[in-house]
Image (spheres, rainbow, N blue to C red):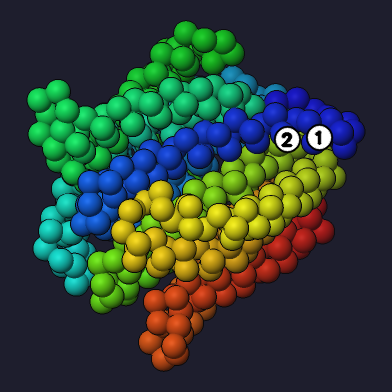
Amino acid sequence: MYETTTLQGKIKLFIKILIPILITQVGIYLISFFDTVMSGRAGATDLAGVAIGSSLWVPVLTAINGVLLAITPIIAHLTGAKENKLVPKKVQQAIYLSIVLGFLVILLGGMALEPVLNLMALEPEVQHIAKYYLITLGAGIIPLFIFNTLRNFMDALGQTRVSMFIILLSLPVNILFNYLFIFGKFGIPALGGIGAGIATAITYWIICLVSILIIAFMQPFRGYQLFSNWLLPNGRAWREQLKIGMPIGIAMFFETSIFSAVTILMSVYSTNTIAAHQAAMNFASLLYMIPLSVGMALTIPIGYEVGAKRYQEAKKYAYIGISGSIFIAIFNGVILFVFREPVASLYNSDPTVIELTASFIVFAVFYQLADAFGAPIQGALRGYKDVNMTLVISLVSYWLIGLPSGFLLANYTSLEAYGYWVGIIIGLSCGAIALLWRLFHLQRKY
């Protein structure tokens, strides 16, 4: 990171930070995308099972990643204030915390998985695939959390291209192992959707090991000597990260878990409807990586400028990011609407599933427009270390407005399953408006 003095310089630096983050986020999501698409080629049952498993895993992953994401503004503030000597201690403690969180997710997930799946009126085969997809994927949870911590450290230094390289390296590896385990090659039995979980866990281990090697031996990371002079776990350092990270993680959980709640509520519909809904949601979530990446990128320069007490410069970065995100969302919406049927056919060859998926994608056009406002603003607020109000806004807009309105529209109007999507759009729109108000309030305060 470095200081900029002109608008052109800010746009150039922001793009330099954003593009690798966007490619990285898309790459991370493509792991789940390829799991779903390649499982769909094994059959509609495998598609539904992996999609259900993914819908349960993603909110948990997002929530924990929110906690781990707190290290980005912490490091950005330190580097902005020229206190680089404190960085290794913060990152070491964040690694300890990521390991503890990984064990907790495995423990609690093991206890909750069966009861949660039993709540859903799934066909036995779909439930079996969803259960063992998650169990096998669980073997890679701890290395994934360690990688995300190290990645957030690298990004906070403005070195976003490095994490991009790691993820791009992992994609062909994930596709290869999916091919081997889903379809059964070279003597490996065909495991269908369950094989996707094994492939993903192996991929998580590989990206963790690669990131450790890069930080240990490459500049500028080697200069920080993260893996030398290890300190014992420190509760005070954990509390500092959790104070910022917990509200971020819970807010992200509220946002993503609403989709899991919708999936549970939609389990009363046919397998084809569930498969189509999940396929459309999977692709819409891929598009969400754009505003999410803008938000993550905004956290870095805004945190850096706030750490240096250059508040007007931080304000300019916020407007650059938000306006860019909205423009991209409008462009994406047009493309998605025009090509909705070819996109739907990526997931399944059944004409009924394709038709249903294309119908859901029309609603996804509007939902990603609302996301284009909300996600970048959340990233800007994280740069100020302002996270508690975001938590409140997420709870109200998604769970007290979005989900109830979706339930009413689905059960008491002719929209049926589509009603849940309309409810999500309403919730996201209300959240975006409230977040924009919060950002204006914060900028006036500073």
Query: Residue drawn 75% across and 25% down?
Result: 2
- Callouts 1 and 2 close, C-beta under 8 Å: yes
Q: Is residue 202 left or right of residue 228?
A: left
Rate crowding at label 2 as few (under 14), some (14 to 19) or many (20 or more) other CA atoms within 10 Å: many
13 lies above or below 395: above
On-image quarter of the N terminus = top right
Q: Quadrant of residue 35?
A: top left
Query: Residue drawn 70% across and 29% down?
Result: 16
Most distant residue in the right direction: 6
**Residue closer to the observer: 164 or 238:** 164
**Residue 281 can be seen, yes or no:** no
Going by the numbered disc 2, the residue's amino acid type is Phe
Q: Which mark is residue 232?
A: none
Residue 77 is situated, as x and y percent measured from the top left of the image, at 66, 35
Q: Is residue 250 left or right of residue 176?
A: right
Q: Is residue 7 left or right of residue 421?
A: right
116 lies above or below 83: below
Going by the numbered disc 1, the residue's amino acid type is Lys
Rate crowding at label 1 as few (under 14), some (14 to 19) or many (20 or more) other CA atoms within 10 Å: some
Q: Name the residue under label 1.
A: 10
**Residue closer to the observer: 237 or 433:** 433
Most distant residue in the front direction: 351
Q: Is mark 1 on a helix, strand or loop?
A: helix
Residue 97 is situated, as x and y percent measured from the top left of the image, at 37, 37
Most distant residue in the bottom direction: 412
Query: Residue drawn 39% across and 57% down?
Result: 279
**Residue closer to the observer: 153 or 47:** 47
Query: Residue drawn 78% across and 45% down?
Result: 320
Residue 333 is situated, as x and y percent measured from the top left of the image, at 63, 58
Q: Mark 2 points at which residue?
A: 14
Q: Report the Cα–Cα distance between label 1 and label 2.
A: 6 Å
Q: What element carries label 2?
A: helix
